[in-house]
Structures are given as C-alpha cells and as structure tokens.
Image (cartoon, rainbow, N blue to C red):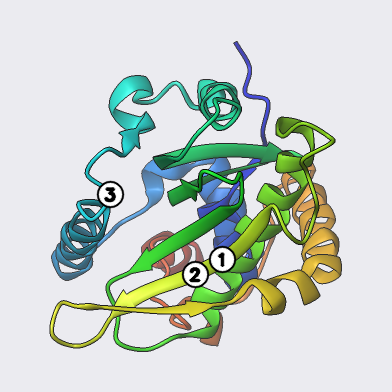
Amino acid sequence: MANTYLLTKSKYIRGLQCEKALYLEVFKPKLAFYPPETLAKFRQGRVFEKTFKDTFPNGIDLSARLRYRMDSYPVLTAQLLQTPGETALFEAGFLYNGVLVLADVVHKHADGSIDIYEVKNSTAVSDTFRNDVAIQYYVIRHALAAILPQDLFCDRLSLSHFYLLYNDGADGFVKQDLKEQAHAACGLIEQNIARFKQVLAAEEPSMPMSDQCDTPYECPFKRYCKRLKK
C-alpha cells in the first residue's frame, strides 16, 4: 500500500537545511552516512527520552505495537485519544497536508486538554529544535480538529501546551512551552511544505556545496555530493 504521506518531521527539517538533502533522503536514503559519534549521540538521546517517558508509568508506546507500519499510527492515535479519561501516548502519529509526525509524548488529561512533549538531550534550545516543535504543532493542531469531537475541540485550548523538554545538565529535565512561537510560524510552515512538495515532484536538485553542508549539522549526504564534484 502506498504511503498516505510524503513528508515527515525529520524530512521537513532536512529540507530546511538543504533541498537536495531532502530529495536524497526520500529517494536515495541508502546514500546517507552517519559517523560513529553521530550514532552514539542518537543512542544517548534515546536513553534520555526513555528516562522522561518513564515518568508516565502507564504510557502506551505505539511504536511497540505498530513498528514500521507508519500509516497505522494516526489511526491508532485517533482511537486512543477518543477514549475517555487520562492517557499518555508515546510516538503518537498525526497526519495533515501530506506530513506525518510522531510525537515523543502526548499527555491527554482527564478534562480532555492535551500537552505535547518533544524531548531533546541537549542543554540549550536551538533554532532547529524550535523548527522541530513548529512543524509538529502545525500538523497536530490540524489533525486534532478531525480527531476530537467538535463540541470539545477548541484550536487554542485542546492543545494546551507544546513543551520542548531538554537536559538540565545533570540528567534532569527543563521544559519550555513553545506553543505560541509555533503557532506564529504556521503560515511559513505551509509555504515550506508546498515548496518541498515541488522539490520532490521534480528531478534531483543541483546545489553547490556550501555552509548548508555542515550547518546546523553535518549532512549525511555530504560524501555523495563530494563524489559528484570529482
């Protein structure tokens, strides 16, 4: 079955760094190379994320149930969020405008209000983290309008907080609510999504190597682009 989505959160962030890298990640993902130190950071991030998730002892991990059946995540998420009462979901899926996002933690309170947490093993808040939260907020706020009963859904109230949860430097937690910043970015996000869809509908972009190859992160397709230059 064909995917019902074209972009994901990580692909959107990749596109902000380099449109060619976005194209390669979608159509030629096997060309990506991640050095050992980068993979180690990924593992450390997963450990930190699990530590926070353990603060929700009754949380439901959708990834444990669904694995790589990505199109099933929004369906199961909707079912679980429509169930009365408090619940915490890990890797809950939301789909809107061809973009699929999986939220680290979705905490629905007994009154129906929802808090979202994006977990980062970092001691500082970067622009990339803000963009990460913003694309999730854009997708989730629209998806919730279809998931929640219309008599209960309120765009700015049902999604109460969107926290960036990061490291306090001693493996504790600091949280910052970025909901209002993310809301203000929705117009720009819609423009970016439209542009990225055009990139993916065309041929592989030809882009010179420049600062975007290393900022904000070293691009995993850098080796491929170097070979093309030879």
Q: Are marks 2 and 1 in contact (CB under 8 Å)?
A: yes
Nearest to the observer: residue 70 or residue 177: 177
Q: Is residue 106 above or below residue 13?
A: above
Residue sitting at 16 percent across and 64 percent down? 44
Reading the image, the residue beneath label 1 is 162
Quadrant where the image shows the N terminus: top right
Q: Is residue 65 left or right of residue 74?
A: left
Residue 149, given in percent of the width and then of the height, sits at 77, 31
Q: Can residue 31 be spotted in the picture?
A: yes
Residue occupying the point 20% across, 68% down:
41
Q: Which label is found at residue 49?
A: none
* First-in-chain label (1 vs 3): 3
Measured as percent of width and height from the top left, residue 13 is found at 57, 64
The amino acid sitting under disc 3 is Phe
Q: Position of residue 20 (x, y in %)?
A: 62, 60
Q: Is residue 208 above or below residue 54?
A: below
Which of labels 1 and 3 is toward the front?
3
Q: CA distance from mark 1 to mark 3?
A: 17 Å
